[in-house]
Image (cartoon, helix red, strand yellow):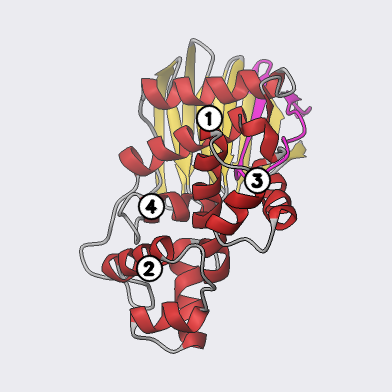
Amino acid sequence: MAKFGQVRWAQKDGSPPTTSQADGPAGESGVRVFRALFDGGAYFSATPEQHLVFLQMSSHLWLDCRIAGRRLRHETAHGALAICPAGMDSSADADGTADMLLVAVKPTQLALAAAEDSALEAELPERLSGYDQMLQQAAQSLAAESAQGYPNGPLFWSEAASRFIGCLVSNYTSVPRRPVRGRLGQRALQRIRDYVLTNLAEPIEVADLAALAGRSSFHFSRVFTRSVGMTPYRYVVHLRLQAAARHLREGRMGLAEIAVDTGFADQSHLSRWVRRVYGVAPSEFA
């Protein structure tokens, strides 16, 4: 048996499958793709730190799947999917040759996407079976880009990863009927977002954001990070970068002017953040 990423897997004879994964592109997309080919049968298990989405690329399989306390043995076809949320124990056995595509998504990235989709408390439940052509196409686009060594660059990958996460948020997450204690409410987040966007060019303190949520600075920072997937400071940077990226794509302002307009100390400060998050120089947005 081999351990690959967060998954332990083996072929029928106990040897590791043929796997492929290119080193991830620069940037902070929060998404990675793995491909595994099993000869004669497959077994895998995982208790992942990231959300895992499995997609079957082979034409026909019998699968015996288990996620947490649920179990299902069923006949599947090309495009069958399963979702194992972070922290849930899972395993599967397959009869016959299997071609599997695995997409790993950081929970923090999913939390941020859910927050921006007005689904702040959204959770990703387990799923043992299903078919979703849109999600499959998004995953295959990621797999093709990864297999070729990211020829279209980090920006293309970031956008493709965002589409995949968006599909997960829209179609597979659920929001609890009652507010979760210790989480930030959607209205409070909207007030914070509106305040940041109105004051992008000005210094923004955590205490100002905490006051909007009616909490102390210390308690607010913990609740915000748990709810949105990043600290209040990083969320402010996130919104500033979104605005800066729009200006960079429009090409109507110089880098120094964009930095001032979006609240970065100077163009060097902006450039460092653009490279860190998007994996490219600001000039590549054009």
- For the residues labelled 1 and 2, the Cα–Cα distance comes to 29 Å
| Position in image of residue 95 (x %, y %) | 56, 20
The residue indicated by pointer 2 is 195
Instruction: Tell me the magenta residue range.
Output: 14-41
Mark 4 falls on what kind of element? Answer: helix
Question: Which is nearer the N-term, disc 3 or disc 1?
Answer: 1
Name the kind of residue labelled 3 in the image: Leu
Q: Quadrant of residue 153?
A: top right
Question: Which is nearer the N-term, disc 1 or disc 4?
Answer: 4
Question: Which is nearer the N-term, disc 1 or disc 2?
Answer: 1
- Identify the residue shown where x is 69% and y is 16%: 39
Q: Nearer the viewer, residue 48 or 269?
A: 269
Question: Which is nearer the N-term, disc 4 or disc 3?
Answer: 4
User: In which quadrant is the C terminus drawn?
Assistant: top right
| Position in image of residue 99 (x %, y %) | 60, 18
The residue indicated by pointer 1 is 160
